[in-house]
Image (cartoon, grey):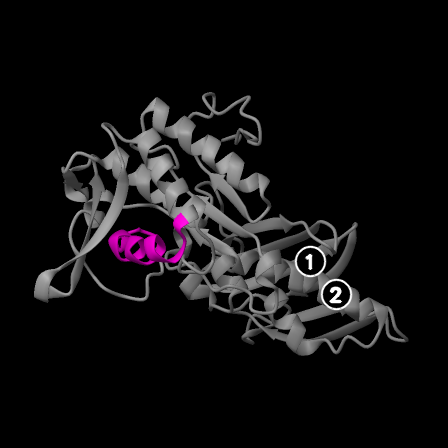
Amino acid sequence: ALARLGGGAELGEAFPDPTACVPERARPDAQRRRGFRIGCTADGPAGPVRLDVAVQAEPELRVVGERLTADGQVLLETALRDPGKRAVQAAWHTAGPTPVTRGPLPDDRLGTALLPLRVAGRTPGQRRVLAAAEQMVVALRSAFACDPEPARMRGPVTAGPGRLLGGCANLADVLWRTRAECGRRHAQFVAAVRAGCAGPVADVLARAEGATGTIRAALDRGDGVRTDLRRLGDGELRYVALALVLLTGPGVLEVDPAGEVPAALQTLTVLADGFDRGLDGRQRLELLRLAARMCERGHIRLVGAVSDGSWAAGTEGATVVHLDRD
């Protein structure tokens, strides 16, 4: 949701079912309002920058407060002063003759993403605000939510631009592209597939199907036998898709890369809810090791949610965070 907001999406697009985000025990106030909070920290050249957003879900969806902080200093703060107006009152740090600049911002978009359009950058304070806001926005935009759906990966796909979707339904189309573009990366992908799939794997192929213009993917077993992806189990398909994601980058995944950041300095964050769903013990460990190797290179990060993180504890390059349900 934050990634969508960072890319300029409206609140309703980021939260299509906002009431589902409201804590179950949250009580409405005197105006029958209920909501939730969401936020994150983005580290980078400007240091750790914290974003906190308060969202009103009922009776109507709107941002009621936002705060951007760095080193304990509030750089941007918004608040809903007049519920009758579709705007929040914003104040951002300037450190010039006027230490704070105030103005209205829309209540259906992320104020941090709008700051580069409102702050001139004349004073050191303004430049600091811009640096923090741009760091946060670039971090949010450079996120790819990935949840492979095996049922949609088994059939043929129409040839397209070769950019992998979050559900990985167009995996065959992407394999058609990546196999031809980078032999070294494809060899690493084949090695990863070999480690996580049953039976021998000499190659992973994508082929066009006659006059239909569709593409199918298959595992080359090396002895003249090719196993179509539709024969693979759910766990194997999820494993293949996640391995491909970890070995590619913004140019291959369906994300909105930050054009103002050189490609060599861009970092992609892969968000994988239910990361280990359908995987056996060997597959999840192989994926975790692959993720650690790729993250060590500095161009990708993986945030995965699992039901039990004990199997990942102690793996070099991985951190297990236990969420408190209370």
> In the figure, residue 188 lies in which quadrant?
top left
For disc 2, the marked residue is 129
Numbered tag placed on residue 68 in the rendering: 1
Alpha carbons under labels 2 and 1: distance apart? 9 Å
Q: Is 178 covered by the magenta stretch?
A: yes
**On screen, residue 198 above or below 5:** above
Where residue 96 sits: x, y (%)? 88, 73
The reply to whether the C-beta atoms of the residues labelled 2 and 1 are less than 8 Å apart is: yes
Q: Secondary structure at mark 2?
A: helix
Where residue 52 sits: x, y (%)? 62, 53
Q: Which residues are magenta?
A: 166-183
Amino acid beneath label 2: Val
Residue positioned most to the right: 97
Nearest-to-viewer mark from 2 and 1: 2
**On screen, residue 297 above or below 79:** above
Amino acid beneath label 1: Leu
Where residue 50 sits: x, y (%)? 67, 51
| Residue sitting at x 21%, y 35% | 222
